[in-house]
Amino acid sequence: MSLIEERVAETDAPVLDILAARWSTRLYDEVSPVDEDALASALEAARWAPSAFNAQPWRFVVARRGTQTHEKVVSTLVEFNQAWAGPAGALIVFIAQTENNGKPVPTALYDLGQAAAHFTVQAHADGLYTHQMTGFDADALAVELGIGAPFIPVTVMAVGELGDVDAAPAAVRERELSPRTRRPVAESVVIDD
């Protein structure tokens, strides 16, 4: 059985195949460029995510491997994330607009999360692999990229072709090969009348 087949989630109720098959890998091919058509489709899926009042309080920075922007993003990641995410074909910075016309946007983070989720599902459907990270210095990243209020970087997502698990460092390989787990739905649903 291949790693891809091993990573398919065993769900308690039927879900779309693409949702069961999607996982957050730390294995990226450091040579293959990101598939530009698949990346464009993932960004388009993010664009069409729902948002309160259709405010679309999201922005994206696309940092392709080999560019100065990519180097800036990598420099703000924690050391462990630098090692596995640096080789990804691209790093996407997901940015929330937390204020509009001087008023707070209370759903900005929620709406940005929906855009990121749509991005990941579309990317996976088109053969790209993704992994979101919060292990980065958001303040340093904002300075590096010239991002100012009312915008804040919330997450960085590695995107690219799947790498070789056998070539990965031991710590990454161990995480990739460990069983996928989630708490049962019954522990997440607090009221079910």
Image (cartoon, helix red, strand yellow):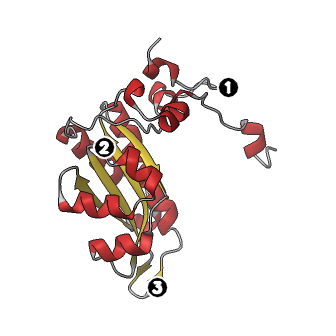
Q: Secondary structure at mark 3?
A: strand
Nearest to the observer: residue 69 or residue 150: 69
Q: Nearer the viewer, residue 7 or 29?
A: 29
Residue under circle 3? 103
**Amino acid of disc 1:** Asp
Of 7 and 150, the residue lying toward us: 7
- Rendered location of residue 52, percent (x, y): 47, 65
Q: Which residue shows up at 44% across the image and 37% down it?
A: 25
Give the class, few, some or many, for how many residues have Cα within 10 Å of label 2's Cα (few <14, many ≥20): many
Task: Check disc 1 and report its element: helix, strand or loop.
Answer: loop
Residue on which the image places disc 2: 88
Residue contact at pointers 3 and 1, CB within 8 angstroms: no
Residue 92 relative to residue 189: left or right? left
Distance CA(mark 3)–CA(mark 1): 42 Å
| Mark 1–mark 2 CB contact (< 8 Å) | no
The spot of residue 128 in percent (x, y) is 32, 35
Closest to the camera, between mark 1 and mark 2, is 2
Residue that carries the numbered disc 1 in the rendered image = 12
Q: Quadrant of the C terminus?
A: top right
- What's the amino acid at mark 2? Ala
Above or below for 127 versus 187: above
- Reading the chain from its start, which is encountered first: label 2 or label 3? 2
Q: Residues within 10 Å of mark 1 (few under 14, many from 20)?
A: few
| Residue at x 27% of width, y 77% of height | 146
Asked if disc 2 and disc 3 are in contact, CB closer than 8 Å, the reply is: no
